[in-house]
């Protein structure tokens, strides 16, 4: 048999048909469809669709829902994609919180949790917590950790994708260069992927939010970072360090050499991050609000107090917005993204906070732009991690098509 014949033989055509039918079924709103719907969607004959569905059923990817009631003509057979045939995990690791989600092959969460991290964790501490929490969460969902198809981890810092290592993470001691992926892959016996947390948040926005071709995503919490999409493609930079807005220095006098911070925060994070805003609020507000702020990492009590008319809260919100606008204007002037999406913990400030940021940005920028709060808020990173894991799981899914 010639190479050309092998590339166009019956087995290749069958595989193409099977893949087309599966994709049409997965594109259905509720992951179910009638055989006639799949015939129309793929352009294949009914016998070809039926053969493809039989193959997918044998692979455990499709289940029949039986014959629907009908009045005349051919019986309407409905089938569904078995999204429960496989599972992936997405994990968001931060210096204070770890979020974990187990999702099926349609991306629907089956189990999720957010775990507070004790102060000053080290890299090995986080790996131990990850393993314990992932095993417990997966087991509770009826999915052994060893049965996951893929796991993706979002982390602060600069990630070397070639080595699969964090090459710079000032906020987590012992995280840089930690060879955690090899140990996790051996334990889970599945692909384990690693990416910068904000890059994963951008992926989540692309899949579930705004599909603007040029988009700036800003993660605003204790850490501040950005992810940039240019012409539909994420821009990581030559050293995967693009978008580290938190390290822009707007506070040190121009003729003075900046000094590195012992806490690992960048200069802009120390100026406009959640912890800096919390200190301002605690100094300005009454004792009850100050106590509430100390226990909420996302400063929700501050924004609620401002909305309720507490006279001490709006000035703090204005100061936070003014500081944030000064740094964000740098990105807007350089990139002119058109669309800015704000996520992270301070996204809980909603329009109250964003309206103030817009006012302070107006005299600083030259071109109009749309700014909105991410609908995913603090879940953007873990959602992006799930999507990254699902993308990799497609490779395993493809092997089941025969």
Image (tube, rainbow, N blue to C red):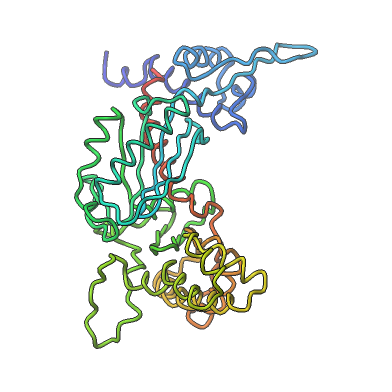
Q: Is residue 309 above or below residue 379?
A: below
Q: Nearer the viewer, residue 199 or 124?
A: 124
Query: Residue 34 at x, y = what percent?
Result: 64, 21
Looking at the image, the residue that sits furthest to the front is 287
- 85 vs 177, left or right, is right
Q: Is residue 389 above or below residue 239?
A: above
Q: Quadrant of residue 238?
A: bottom left
Q: Quadrant of residue 67?
A: top right
Quarter of the image for the C terminus: give it.
top left
Which residue sits at x=40%, y=59%? 227
- 126 vs 30, left or right, is left
Query: Residue 346 at x, y = what percent?
Result: 50, 63
Quarter of the image for the N terminus: give it.
top left
Looking at the image, the residue that sits furthest to the right is 71
Q: Nearer the viewer, residue 299 or 338?
A: 299
Query: Residue 45 at x, y = what percent?
Result: 57, 17
Query: Residue 177 at x, y = what percent?
Result: 19, 50
Which residue sits at x=48%, y=28%? 141
Q: How many marks?
A: 0
Which residue sits at x=32%, y=73%? 267
Q: Nearer the viewer, residue 93 or 190?
A: 93
Q: Quadrant of residue 13?
A: top left
Looking at the image, the residue that sits furthest to the bottom is 255
Which residue sits at x=48%, y=17%? 56
């Amino acid at each position: 048999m010639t190479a050309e014949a092998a590339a166009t033989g019956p087995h290749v055509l069958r595989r193409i048909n099977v893949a087309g039918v599966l994709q049409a079924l997965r594109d259905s709103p509720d992951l179910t469809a009638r055989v006639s719907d799949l015939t129309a969607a793929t352009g294949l004959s009914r016998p070809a669709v039926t053969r493809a569905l039989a193959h997918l059923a044998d692979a455990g990817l499709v289940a029949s829902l039986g014959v629907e009631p009908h009045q005349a003509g051919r019986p309407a057979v409905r089938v569904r994609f078995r999204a429960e045939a496989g599972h992936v995990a997405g994990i968001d690791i931060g210096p204070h919180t770890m979020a974990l989600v187990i999702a099926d092959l349609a991306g629907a969460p089956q189990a999720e949790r957010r775990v507070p991290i004790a102060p000053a964790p080290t890299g090995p501490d986080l790996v131990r917590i990850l393993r314990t929490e992932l095993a417990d969460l997966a087991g509770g969902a009826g999915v052994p950790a060893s049965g996951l198809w893929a796991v993706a981890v979002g982390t602060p810092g600069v990630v070397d994708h070639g080595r699969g290592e964090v090459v710079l993470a000032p906020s987590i001691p012992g995280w840089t260069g930690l060879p955690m992926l090899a140990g996790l892959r051996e334990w889970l016996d599945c692909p384990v992927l690693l990416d910068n947390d904000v890059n994963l948040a951008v992926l989540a926005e692309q899949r579930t939010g705004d599909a603007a071709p040029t988009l700036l995503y800003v993660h605003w919490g204790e850490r501040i970072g950005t992810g940039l999409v240019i012409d539909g493609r994420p821009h990581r930079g030559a050293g995967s360090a693009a978008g580290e807005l938190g390290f822009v220095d707007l506070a040190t006098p121009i003729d003075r050499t900046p000094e590195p911070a012992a806490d690992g925060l960048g200069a802009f994070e120390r100026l406009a991050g959640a912890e800096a805003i919390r200190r301002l609020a605690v100094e300005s507000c009454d004792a009850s609000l100050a106590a509430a702020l100390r226990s909420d990492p996302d400063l929700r009590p501050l924004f609620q107090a401002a909305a309720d008319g507490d006279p001490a809260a709006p000035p703090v919100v204005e100061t936070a917005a003014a500081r944030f606008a000064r740094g964000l204007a740098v990105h807007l002037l350089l990139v002119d993204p058109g669309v800015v999406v704000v996520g992270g913990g301070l996204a809980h400030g909603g329009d109250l906070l964003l309206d103030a940021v817009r006012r302070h940005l107006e005299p600083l920028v030259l071109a109009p732009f749309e700014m909105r709060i991410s609908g995913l808020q603090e879940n953007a990173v873990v959602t992006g991690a799930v999507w990254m894991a699902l993308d990799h799981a497609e490779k395993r899914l493809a092997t089941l098509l025969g």
